[in-house]
Image (cartoon, rainbow, N blue to C red):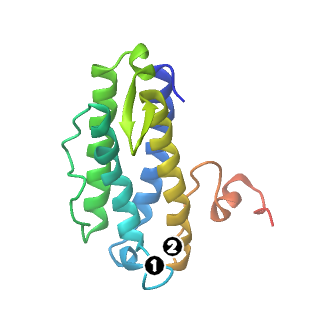
Amino acid sequence: MFTKIEHFEKAYQSLVSGTMNILNALTDQSLSQSVTDDHRTLGRMAWHNVTTIPEMMNLTGLTVKTIAPDAPVPKKAADIKAAYQAVTGELLKQVKEKWHDADLMAEDDMYGEKWKKGYTLYVLILHEVHHRGQMTVLMRQAGLPVPGTAGPSKEEWSKYGMKPPE
């Protein structure tokens, strides 16, 4: 749980940077990749990360308007990337302008439970990291190079003069 806005800001900027690395690797063709026909596609998963931001954060009293929580999945990877950049920028700006450290202890009704705002920000990050992991599996299945987001990916170890771990 976050207790200081500046700690959230640093963690969120790192999260956004890693997610942007993933989004930059997507192609329009890869957006239709799924594990099976009855699971989310790579494009839907990427878009879910975008629309969760207004869906979740609007429950905290913030008004994230860049993207509607129920907006349809774009057909172009560039549109998903642009929407992600816009909505994450809007969220960070609102948190910094509208909340103070003490606000992070205030509780909101979140999915039938009471969550402190600082916990909601923590869950938002965990949620996105979870889906980023799913996205990297789909990216491998689609034949895309997978960028490292928390250390080098298999493809990136050679940049450091090392063999990938087994």
The amino acid type of the residue labelled 2 equals: Leu
The reply to whether residue 42 is visible in this rendering is yes
The residue located at (40%, 76%) in the rendering is 30
Horizontal arrangement in the rendering, residue 123 relative to residue 79 (left or right): right
Disc ID at residue 60: none
The CA span between labels 1 and 2 is 6 Å
Q: Counting other residues with Cα less than 10 Å from the Cα at mark 2, is it few (<14), some (14-19), or many (20 or more)?
A: many
Residue assigned mark 1: 34
Image x and y of residue 73, in percent? 26, 66
The residue located at (36%, 68%) in the rendering is 44
Q: Earlier in the sequence, mark 1 or mark 2?
A: 1
In the displayed structure, 142 sits above or below 47; it is: below
Q: Residue 66's quadrant in the figure?
A: top left
Quadrant for the N terminus in the image:
top right
Horizontal arrangement in the rendering, residue 86 relative to residue 13 (left or right): left
Q: Are marks 1 and 2 in contact (CB under 8 Å)?
A: yes
The reply to whether residue 5 is visible in this rendering is no
The residue located at (53%, 65%) in the rendering is 134
Q: Indicate the secondary structure of the residue bearing disc 1.
A: loop
Q: Residue furthest right?
A: 166
Image x and y of residue 34, in percent? 45, 79
Q: Indicate the secondary structure of the residue bearing disc 2.
A: helix
In the displayed structure, 18 sits above or below 33; it is: above
Front position in the image: 30 or 107 = 107
The residue located at (50%, 71%) in the rendering is 139
Quadrant for the C terminus in the image:
bottom right
The amino acid type of the residue labelled 1 equals: Ser
Horizontal arrangement in the rendering, residue 163 relative to residue 78 (left or right): right
Disc ID at residue 138: 2
Horizontal arrangement in the rendering, residue 161 relative to residue 39 (left or right): right
In the displayed structure, 140 sits above or below 117; it is: below
Q: Counting other residues with Cα less than 10 Å from the Cα at mark 1, is it few (<14), some (14-19), or many (20 or more)?
A: many
